[in-house]
Image (spheres, helix red, strand yellow):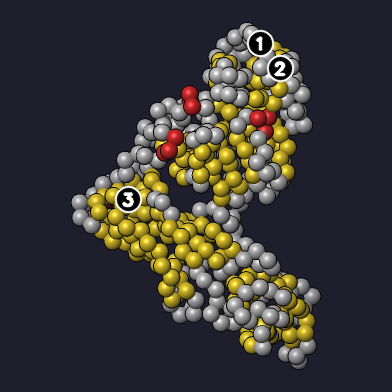
Amino acid sequence: MRTRCLLILSLLLGLSLALTVPAAGQEILVQNGTTVEVNNGGVWDLQGGTMDFGPAGATAALSEPSGGRVYNGLLTAVRALSNPTAADPAGLGIEITASNDLGDVTVTRGHAIQTASNGNESIERYYEISPSQNNSGLSAELRFSYNDAELNGRPESDLEFFKSTDGGSSWSEEGFDSRDATANTVTLSGIASLSRWTLGSEASPLPVELARFEAAKKQARGAGEEAIQLTWTTAAEQNNAGFEVQRRIVDARAPGARRGAEVGSWQQVGYRESAAEGGTTTEAQTYRFTDEALPYAADTLAYRLRQVDTDGSATLTDPVTVGRGGPDRLRLLGTAPNPARQRATVRYGVPGGLDDDVVLRLYDMLGRRVRTVTAGAEAGRHEQTLELGGLSPGVYVLRLRAGGATTTKKLT
């Protein structure tokens, strides 16, 4: 049976305190309002025990300045996080930013090395983050702190995020947005859901030698809208099963527009099998993929490849970014769905120079106005929801007017 002790500490900066080493498996409960400080390179070895900073509402916290650290055990805390901005629950070293109410979030910090199926190892720190609600479509940001003594031989210049949704049995490479070797932090945004996270090295040998990866706009077939064509070339391949094509919205029209699902997160939009027989070749191979189902309101998109080995392991490429530019003319696209019952999605584009007096309205067949969808929209692409509840069945006309130009579409 694990023993439990109540730790009541009041530590002042610069005060030296001798602490009894906890017994193996011991659980240390930190009293509410207490700050546990380990500083000046000091190390507190938990010997496999757990340090608990209390439930939601508690104010106990950890402080590890000047290279001090707690390790070889678990640190845990529960805190209520509603729309958090750089919130570091109980000072455990993981800053969380999200535009959602995550409810009571359980954060556990561990110090066991995490190992991927290909044998690659993480640093000696990981975090398990478990929101009690709204753990999907977050577009959240994490800033992961670490101690130099935890690097496990991983160069700081190579650190990036890895994610596990099954308690560390399998891992996916998630990349990074920024690294700060002075502050000992790595940051990643556009995170759709929270689970187990660690840092590992991106310098693993690539089974595929990528020579070129490009993205460019092109005209979509029959749709009158542009598409994005991706082209990549490999110089050599070894045990390559294929490539997942992933897309991320970098920037979208926010005023008056419905942002795409999970704005800022990576989503798979296609797949290309290896062109090499058996997935191995020393000859150059060229691949193409055309993305025609673009998020209409997105102004800038990023793409990357997730190269998958025949054994299931995967490697991510650096992303390429493509700006779509503004609409070249006033454009009102057909609604979806059409016919519609309760609501429909309306997409329209306003070019620069025509964004004076922009009005989008719905009329019945007698010319009577029944809805004003928007007024005063900016130049750019827009996507909005049109509520149809209360309207009689029949045919209606959507009319978009901007700067003296007008365009219409019928809606049943």
For badge 3, the amino acid type reads: Ala
In the image, what residue occupies the spot 65% across and 41% down? 86
As rendered, which of 89 and 17 lies closer to the eye? Answer: 17
In the image, what residue occupies the spot 66% across and 85% down? 403
Viewport quadrant of the C terminus: bottom right
- Residue 136 image point, x, y percent: 61, 48
- 167 up-or-down from 393: above or below: above
Mark with earlier residue (1, 3): 1
Q: On the picture, is 54 further left or further right than 192?
A: right
Query: Would you name the residue on which mark 1 appears?
Result: 17
Q: CA distance from mark 2 to mark 3?
A: 56 Å
Viewport quadrant of the N terminus: top right
In the image, farthest residue toward the bottom: 366
Q: For mark 2, give the secondary structure.
A: loop
Q: On the picture, is 217 further left or further right than 187?
A: left
Q: For mark 1, give the secondary structure.
A: loop
CB under 8 Å between callouts 2 and 1?
yes
- Residue 365 image point, x, y percent: 73, 90
In the image, what residue occupies the spot 78% across and 88% down? 368
Q: CA distance from mark 2 to mark 1?
A: 8 Å
Residue count near mark 1 (Cα–Cα under 10 Å), binned few <14, some 14–19, many ≥20: few
Mark with earlier residue (2, 3): 2
- 356 up-or-down from 293: above or below: below
In the image, what residue occupies the spot 35% across and 58% down? 213
Q: CA distance from mark 1 to mark 3?
A: 57 Å
Query: Would you name the residue on which mark 2 appears?
Result: 11
Query: Would you name the residue on which mark 3 appears?
Result: 241
Q: Is residue 412 visible?
A: no
Residue count near mark 2 (Cα–Cα under 10 Å), binned few <14, some 14–19, many ≥20: some
Residue count near mark 3 (Cα–Cα under 10 Å), binned few <14, some 14–19, many ≥20: many
In the image, farthest residue toward the left: 282
For badge 2, the amino acid type reads: Leu
